[in-house]
C-alpha cells in the first residue's frame, strides 16, 4: 500500500490544480515515511535476529523496490527532496545488493522456495529498473549518449533486461510457469493468516449479529492454507438464521455431543484385540 500511495502522489502532482501539490506531498510522505522505517526494521532484524537461510525468499526485494519508487517520485513532487531521496536511493541500493547475492547463494546451495513463489523472482527485474528511474529523477541527468542517460542508469537498465532474459529461459527449465502464482504464500504469511483468520471471522460474525444482517450472509468462508473452513449458520424454530455462539476468546462455540457406551468392557471398541466377541456399541446423542 505504501508503494501505491507514492504512485498516487505522482499522479496528484500537477500544475493544473492549485492545492494538488500540497495533497501530493501529504500522500507521498504517508507512503514514503513508513516504508523507510519498515526497511530499517527489516535490516535490523537481519543483523540482530538469527535466522536460517531457508527463510530468505524473493519477496524481500519488495522493500528496496519500494524505496526506489519513492526516490523516483520525490524529486518530481518537489525538487528540494533530491537530497533526501538520495538517502532513500543509497539505502535501497544497499538492501538490493545484499538480498540479490543472498538469493543466488541460497538457490545454489539449498532447495528452491515453494513453486507458487517462483514468479516473485521477477523482483530481480523490478529492482534495477526502478533504481535506474530513481537515479535519473534524482540527478536530473542531461541527455548523454544514444539513450539520453549516463553510464550508471544504462548499466542498471541493461541489467534488468538481462535478468528478464534469464527468467524467460527458466520457463524451459521448468522453474517458472510450473504452477500458478498464489498471493497466500507471499512473504510466508501462512502462519499469520492461520493465527488471525479465526479471530477475524469471529469478529465478522459478532458484527453481523449486532447489526441483524445475518440472513443474506448465512455462511462465512475462511481459507486457511488452501483449505476452505466454513462456519455455517443454524436455523432456529422460526426458520430465521442464527449465528453460532462465540467464546470469550473469539472462537466459535461447538455444540456439545454426549457419547453413550453400552459394553461390558469399558474402553474397548468393536473389533479390538480384547473385545472377546463383545462389540462395543457407540451411540452419539444429537446436539441440543
Image (tube, rainbow, N blue to C red):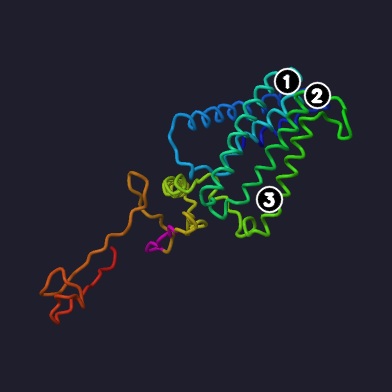
Sooner in the amino-acid sequence: mark 3 or mark 2:
2
Identify the mark at residue 140; answer none if there is no mark: 2
Question: Could you say which is closer to the camera, residue 206 or residue 84?
Answer: 84
Quadrant of the image occupied by residue 135: top right
Identify the mark at residue 22; answer none if there is no mark: none
Task: Answer whether labels 2 and 1 touch (C-beta < 8 Å).
Answer: yes
Residue assigned mark 3: 167
Sooner in the amino-acid sequence: mark 2 or mark 1:
1
Residue reaching furthest to the front:
109
Query: In the rendered view, would you say 37 is above or below 185?
Result: above
Which SS class for mark 2?
loop
Residue 245 placement (x, y as % from top left): 35, 52
211 sits to left or right of 132? left
Residue 84 placement (x, y as % from top left): 67, 20
Are there few (<14), some (14-19), or many (20+) residues within 10 Å of tag 2? Answer: few
Q: Which residue is at a point 67% across and 38% down the rendered structure image?
A: 127
Residue 186 placement (x, y as % from top left): 55, 47
Residue 192 placement (x, y as % from top left): 46, 44
Which SS class for mark 1?
helix
19 sits to left or right of 216? right
Question: Could you say which is closer to the camera, residue 29 or residue 96?
Answer: 96
Question: Could you say which is closer to the camera, residue 191 or residue 31?
Answer: 191
Q: What's drawn in magenta, residue-wise?
A: 230-238
Please check the rendered image and state whether residue 262 is part of the magenta-colored stretch, yes or no: no
Amino acid at each position: 500500500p505504501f508503494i501505491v500511495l507514492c504512485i498516487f502522489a505522482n499522479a496528484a502532482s500537477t500544475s493544473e490544480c492549485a492545492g494538488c501539490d500540497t495533497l501530493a506531498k501529504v500522500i507521498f510522505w504517508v507512503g514514503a515515511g513508513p516504508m523507510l522505517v519498515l526497511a530499517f526494521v527489516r535490516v535490523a532484524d537481519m543483523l540482530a535476529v538469527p535466522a536460517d537461510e531457508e527463510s530468505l525468499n524473493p519477496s524481500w526485494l519488495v522493500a528496496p523496490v519500494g524505496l526506489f519508487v519513492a526516490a523516483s517520485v520525490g524529486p518530481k513532487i518537489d525538487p528540494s527532496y533530491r537530497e533526501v531521496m538520495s538517502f532513500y536511493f543509497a539505502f535501497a541500493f544497499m538492501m538490493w545488493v545484499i538480498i540479490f547475492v543472498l538469493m543466488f547463494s541460497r538457490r545454489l546451495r539449498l532447495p528452491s522456495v515453494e513453486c507458487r513463489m517462483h514468479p516473485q523472482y521477477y523482483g530481480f527485474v523490478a529492482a534495477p529498473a526502478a533504481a535506474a528511474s530513481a537515479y535519473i529523477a534524482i540527478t536530473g541527468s542531461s541527455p548523454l549518449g544514444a539513450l539520453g542517460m549516463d553510464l550508471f542508469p544504462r548499466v542498471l537498465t541493461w541489467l534488468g533486461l538481462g535478468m528478464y532474459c534469464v527468467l524467460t529461459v527458466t520457463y524451459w527449465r521448468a522453474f517458472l510457469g510450473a504452477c500458478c502464482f498464489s498471493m497466500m504464500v507471499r512473504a510466508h504469511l501462512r502462519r499469520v493468516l492461520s493465527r488471525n483468520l479465526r479471530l477475524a471471522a469471529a469478529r465478522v460474525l459478532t458484527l453481523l449479529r449486532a447489526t441483524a444482517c445475518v440472513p443474506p450472509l448465512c455462511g462465512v468462508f475462511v481459507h486457511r492454507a488452501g483449505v476452505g473452513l466454513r462456519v455455517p449458520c443454524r436455523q432456529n424454530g422460526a426458520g430465521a438464521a442464527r449465528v453460532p455462539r462465540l467464546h470469550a476468546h473469539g472462537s466459535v462455540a461447538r455444540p456439545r455431543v454426549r457419547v453413550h457406551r453400552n459394553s461390558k468392557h469399558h474402553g474397548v471398541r468393536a473389533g479390538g484385540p480384547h473385545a472377546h466377541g463383545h462389540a462395543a456399541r457407540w451411540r452419539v446423542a444429537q446436539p441440543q
